[in-house]
Image (cartoon, rainbow, N blue to C red):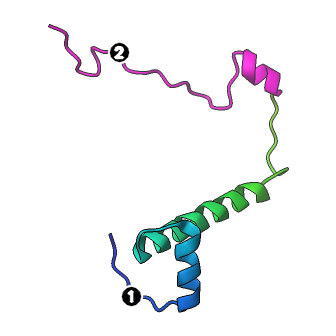
Amino acid sequence: MARATVTLPQDLLTELLSLVDAKSKTEAVITAIKDEIRLRRAARIKAMAGQMEFTAEAEELRHGDQCLFPFRYQAPSLAQSGFRHN
């Protein structure tokens, strides 16, 4: 974890502490940073609306053999995972 010294306005910090119901100032700031990152990522995804083209219909993807990705995940067998049963 990185350490940082920041100067924050007391009224903003007090409001943040009450809004996020944090036990400490550090916890409140970490929560606020995580929320901001989440919101900005969501905004970026929303900005892409209408910019991607899918050639398959949802029904085909749901019930057909096609998938969005050219590969399928296959879980390793118990023998491959090193699991042994005695």
Vertically, is 51 above or below 85? below
Identify which residue is drawn at 66% across, 65% down. 40
Task: Give the number of the disc on residue 64.
Answer: none
Q: Name which quarter of the figure residue 67 lies in.
A: top right
Residue 6 included in the magenta stretch of the image: no
Residue 3 position in % (x across, y down): 33, 79
Please name the amino acid that badge 2 sits on. Answer: Ser
Dot 1 falls on a residue whose secondary structure is: loop
The part of the image, by quadrant, that contains residue 56 is: top right
Q: Which residue is mark 1?
A: 5
* Residue toward you, 34 or 78: 34
Region of the chain picked out in magenta, as a range: 57-86
Q: Main secondary structure of the magenta part?
A: loop
The answer to whether the residues at label 1 and label 2 have Cβ atoms under 8 Å apart is: no
Against 23, is 14 above or below?
below
Within the magenta stretch, is there residue 81?
yes
x and y, in percent, of residue 61 in the image = 74, 23
Residue at 65% of width from left, 63% of height from top? 39
The amino acid sitting under disc 1 is: Thr
Residue 77: mark in rendering:
2
As drawn, which residue projects farthest toward the left? 86
- Going 27% across and 14% down the picture, which residue do you hit? 79
In the rendered structure, the answer to whether residue 71 lies left or right of residue 75 reads right
Q: Position of residue 27 (x, y in %)?
A: 43, 69
Viewer-side residue, 45 vs 53: 45
Relative placement, left or right, of 67 versus 35 is right
